[in-house]
Image (cartoon, rainbow, N blue to C red):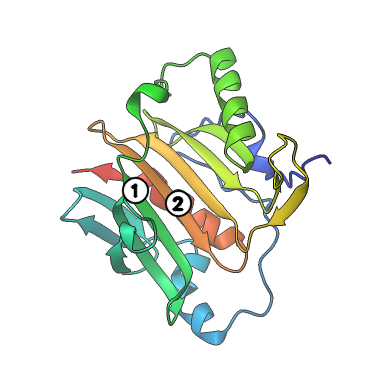
Amino acid sequence: MNKKAKIITALGLMGIVIMGTGMNQADAKKKAPKTETAQVQTVQAPAEQGVNSYVYTSTKYGYTINCPQKPNVIPADALYEGKEGEILIFANEGYNIKHAWVVIKNAFDDSKVPDLNTIDEESAKNYLNGLMGSSGYEAIQLINRNATDRAIYAITAKEMEVDTDGDGQPDTVVTADRQMAVTFFRGNKGGRYSVQLIDYPELRDAAIDSFQKGVVSFAEK
């Protein structure tokens, strides 16, 4: 069975985005739900306007990032065992997170990720193809996070083929309850970060746009 890759227009494989101010909007994720609750709509209004007016400073991990509003912050290991970092929550219903950014420090092994700022196009294609095949991504791209630094940007797959009987061949399709936008990059002081978007039940254009603006603004203090 072929993967049903619902590719975002701005996330074609190995597309290079060249913009002085960083990432462009992934404007083809036309999935905004029509029936969100009033609570979520109210809380997320700044993000829907595309304005990241609140600068969050992490005193523990030493970074700043421009957010759509002041977040509630919990440790990353509250959801992801053994992970260093924070979850910046913008909307939730009880314990159910509806809209958040996950900031992970020491997110990857430095020796296993090439220098994204100097990698040549052919090597980048091969590297991204490997990630695409092994990590359950629906779309992946190398982008210019800002004027000097590149990042890996991906969307997790909604449907994945898995091997349930151990014969080495996929035999079942599983459907994830949510998709996430995921970035990996080295910070301006060499930190290894991943910033991820949670937007439930489906990724909205406005949330993606706000998230991208946040990732562009990310800086180590």
The quadrant holding residue 89 is: bottom left
Residue 93, horizontal then vertical, whole percent: 47, 81
Image quadrant in which the C terminus is located: top left
Residue 26, horizontal then vertical, whole percent: 60, 48
Crowd around label 1: few <14 · some 14–19 · many ≥20 (10 Å): many
Q: Which mark is residue 49?
A: none
Residue 21, horizontal then vertical, whole percent: 43, 39
Residue 82, horizontal then vertical, whole percent: 31, 51
Image: 144 above or below 41: above
Q: Residue at x 20, y 50 (%)?
A: 61
Residue lying furthest left in this view?
Answer: 59
Q: Which mark is residue 196?
A: 2
For this rendering, which residue is in front, 117 or 46? 117
Using residue 77 as the reference point, say whether residue 112 is left or right of it: right
Image quadrant in which the N terminus is located: top right
Image: 203 above or below 212: below
Q: Residue at x 32, y 50 (%)?
A: 83
Q: Secondary structure at mark 1?
A: strand
Using residue 157 as the reference point, say whether residue 51 is left or right of it: left
Q: Residue at x 43, y 64 (%)?
A: 100
Q: Which residue is mark 1?
A: 104
Image: 46 above or below 140: below
Q: Separation of disc 2 and disc 1 at Cα?
A: 8 Å
Contact flag, marks 2 and 1 (Cβ < 8 Å): yes
The quadrant holding residue 56 is: bottom left
Q: Secondary structure at mark 2?
A: strand
User: What amino acid is labelled 1 in the image?
Assistant: Ile
Q: Earlier in the sequence, mark 2 or mark 1?
A: 1
Figure label count: 2
Q: Residue at x 59, y 46 (%)?
A: 155
